[in-house]
Image (cartoon, grey):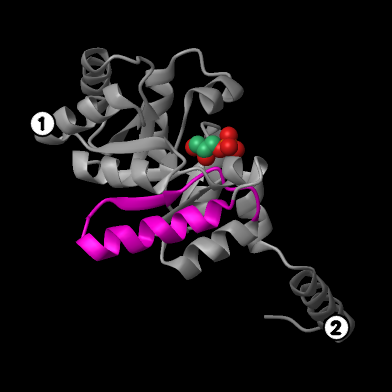
Amino acid sequence: MEIFLDTADINAIREANSWGILSGVTTNPTLVAKAGHKDFKSAVREICKIVNGPISAEVLSLKAEEMIREAEKLSKIHKNVIIKIPMCEEGLKAIKALSKKGIKTNCTLVFSANQALLAAIAGADYVSPFVGRLDDIGNDGMKLVAEIVQIYRNYGFKTKIIVASVRHPMHVIEAALLGADIATVPFEVLKKMVSHAKTSEGIKRFMDDAKKSKQKI
Ligand code: G3P
């Protein structure tokens, strides 16, 4: 299981990367806007300098030909750039064409097992089921992940599953138990994964006792 950071915030990426647990980064137009980047391509370049792993950058067009053109531009930024393509008919065309050109893709906005199946058949390297947004509308995001894991296993698809739209640490545990390849998590969720009240309590007690008994190293 690998952990990606789901953000375009350079400081968060730098900090999480320093913990030694980060394998990649995913961005989307909303996250880029939130981070306030004026120049998207230089932001991607900067992220690639920090994290040595797959960095997803999303296309902005809705026509296959344009998506392919944008993908070619983005993929020139760095060898680790993965092109995020939204699931739709034009997206499938673009994924197929890009896979023939050897440009890696991450099929995003996946909300059904059929969409994940089609993305894999088209040749997507990654597929991103949005579990949180499914939960938001009263569906079961993790049920979708379980279905995709099973379908990919049945047919030996190499497409990696990135559990996305993660809202809380339980999503990551469930994703790991189901055997998903990757969870892409917001920085706030990553921090919650590290912490535990009993750990903080234990650290405080050890520090207090060490101080009281004048221990030194
Ligand atoms: O990377 C895309 C996905 O993780 C978005 O999450 O929180 O906007 O549903 P969210």
Position of residue 211 relative to residue 196, above or below, is below
Residue under label 2, please give it. 209
The span from disc 1 to disc 2 (Cα, nearest Å) is: 62 Å
Say whether residue 32 is visible: yes
Kind of residue at badge 1: Lys
Is the distance from the Cβ of mark 2 to the nearest ligand 1 atom less than 8 Å? no
Q: Residue at x 51, y 31 (%)?
A: 8
Kind of residue at badge 2: Asp
Q: Residue 64, percent across and down?
A: 24, 18
Region of the chain picked out in magenta, as a range: 140-168
Q: Residue at x 41, y 58 (%)?
A: 147
Residue 145 in the figure: left or right of residue 212: left
Question: Is the N terminus in the top left, top right, bottom left or bottom right quadrant?
Answer: bottom left
Say whether residue 53 is visible: no
- Secondary structure of the residue carrying numbered label 1: loop
Question: Is the C terminus in the top left, top right, bottom left or bottom right quadrant?
Answer: bottom right
Residue under label 1, please give it. 101
